[in-house]
C-alpha cells in the first residue's frame, strides 16, 4: 500500500481526490486534509497567507499519523505566487515539518510537462489576469514556453468549484493554441478528473489539470508509476504498472 497525503485549501473540488483514488487501484490510498479557513479569493496578496508555513504545518501531523509517505500542497496559486525561489523554500519547509518528501501543485505542473516531453504549452486559468500572469512567470522560470494564456477572471474558489462541464470545456477551447503542445488548467478548485479523456479527445493533445498533476506528483515522490488512462495521457507513461 502506498499512502499519499494532500493539504487542500477550503472546499471546492476535493471530491476529485476520491475519484482519482478509485481510478488508481486498490494499493494506493489518497488522504486529504483541509487547511484552515482562508480568504476566498485568487487575488495575489492573500495567496501568500494561504500558503504560509504555519498554515501548512497545521495539517501535517494528521497526514503523518495516517501513514502518508509524501505530502503535496494541493494549491497551485498558493505556491506559484511566491515565485520560483519562494515556492522552493515553501516545499523545503513543508518537507522539514513533515519529515518526508513534499512538493506542491505548481511543481507538479513543471514535472508533468517534462514527463510528457513537451516544451510549449497553453494555459487556461480561472484566475484574474494578474494571478494567471504569475503562473506564466513560474512556468517560464522552469524553462517552459507559454504560447498563450486565457484567464476567465472568475476570482473565487467557490465560484470555480460550481463550474460544470460546459464552463470547463469553454475555458479549454478558448485557451487552446495550435502552437501549444499541451494545455494546462491550473486551478485545484476546478472539477476536471471526470472529463480528462474527453478534454484530450476534444483538443487532440495532452491536458494537464491541477488535481490530476497534484496526485501524479505525490506518486512521483514515492517512485510509483501507474498506468491509468482514465486520468489522461500523463498516466500512460512508461514503465507501466497495469491497473
Image (tube, grey):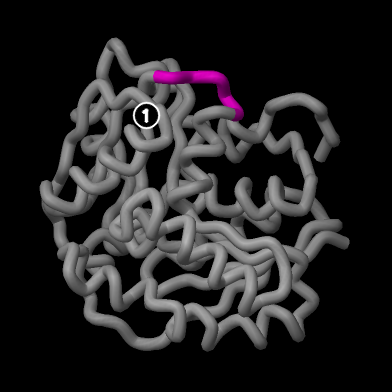
Of residue 237 and residue 162, the one placed in the foreground of this image is 237
Instruction: Please state, as top left, top right, bottom left or bottom right, where the C terminus lies in the image.
Output: top right
Residue 212 placement (x, y as % from top left): 53, 47
Residue at the disc numbered 1: 183
Question: Up-down: is 90 above or below 104?
Answer: below
Q: Is residue 118 visible?
A: yes
Of residue 107 and residue 214, the one placed in the foreground of this image is 107
Question: Up-down: is 103 above or below 231?
Answer: below
- Picture quadrant where residue 218 is located: bottom right
Question: Up-down: is 141 above or below 159?
Answer: above
The number of numbered discs placed on residues in the rendered structure image is 1
Look at 28% across and 62% down and name the residue there.
162
Residue 58 placement (x, y as % from top left): 52, 88
Q: How crowded is mark 1: few (under 14 residues within 10 Å), some or many (20 or more)?
A: many
Look at 70% across and 26% down and name the residue there.
237
Q: Can residue 11 be seen in this view?
A: no
Question: Up-down: is 173 above or below 67?
Answer: above
- Picture quadrant where residue 60 is located: bottom right
For this view, does 1 lie left or right of residue 208?
Answer: right
For this view, does 126 lie left or right of residue 219?
Answer: left
Magenta segment range?
Answer: 115-119
For this view, does 174 lie left or right of residue 89?
Answer: left
Residue 11 placement (x, y as % from top left): 39, 75
Q: Magenta region's main secondary structure?
A: loop
Determine if the magenta segment contains residue 117: yes
Amino acid at each position: 500500500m502506498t499512502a499519499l497525503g494532500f493539504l487542500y485549501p477550503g472546499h471546492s473540488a476535493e471530491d476529485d481526490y476520491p475519484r482519482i483514488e478509485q481510478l488508481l487501484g486498490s494499493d494506493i490510498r489518497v488522504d486529504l486534509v483541509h487547511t484552515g479557513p482562508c480568504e476566498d479569493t485568487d487575488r495575489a496578496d492573500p495567496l501568500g497567507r494561504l500558503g504560509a508555513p504555519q498554515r501548512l504545518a497545521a495539517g501535517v501531523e494528521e497526514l503523518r499519523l495516517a501513514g502518508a509517505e509524501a505530502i503535496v500542497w494541493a494549491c497551485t496559486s498558493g505556491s506559484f505566487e511566491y515565485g520560483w525561489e519562494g515556492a522552493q523554500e515553501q516545499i523545503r519547509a513543508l518537507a522539514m515539518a513533515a519529515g518526508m518528501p513534499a512538493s506542491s501543485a505548481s511543481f507538479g505542473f513543471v514535472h508533468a510537462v517534462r514527463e510528457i516531453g513537451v516544451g510549449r504549452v497553453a494555459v487556461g486559468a480561472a484566475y484574474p489576469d494578474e494571478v494567471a500572469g504569475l503562473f506564466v512567470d513560474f512556468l517560464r522560470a522552469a524553462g517552459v514556453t507559454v504560447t498563450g494564456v486565457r484567464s476567465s477572471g472568475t476570482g473565487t474558489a467557490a465560484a470555480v468549484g460550481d463550474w460544470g462541464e460546459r464552463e470547463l470545456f469553454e475555458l479549454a477551447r478558448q485557451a487552446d493554441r495550435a502552437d501549444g503542445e499541451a494545455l494546462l488548467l491550473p486551478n485545484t478548485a476546478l472539477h476536471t478528473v471526470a472529463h480528462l479523456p474527453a478534454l484530450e479527445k476534444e483538443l487532440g493533445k495532452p491536458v494537464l489539470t491541477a488535481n490530476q498533476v497534484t496526485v501524479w506528483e505525490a506518486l512521483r515522490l514515492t517512485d510509483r508509476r501507474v498506468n491509468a488512462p482514465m486520468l489522461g495521457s500523463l498516466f500512460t507513461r512508461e514503465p507501466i504498472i497495469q491497473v
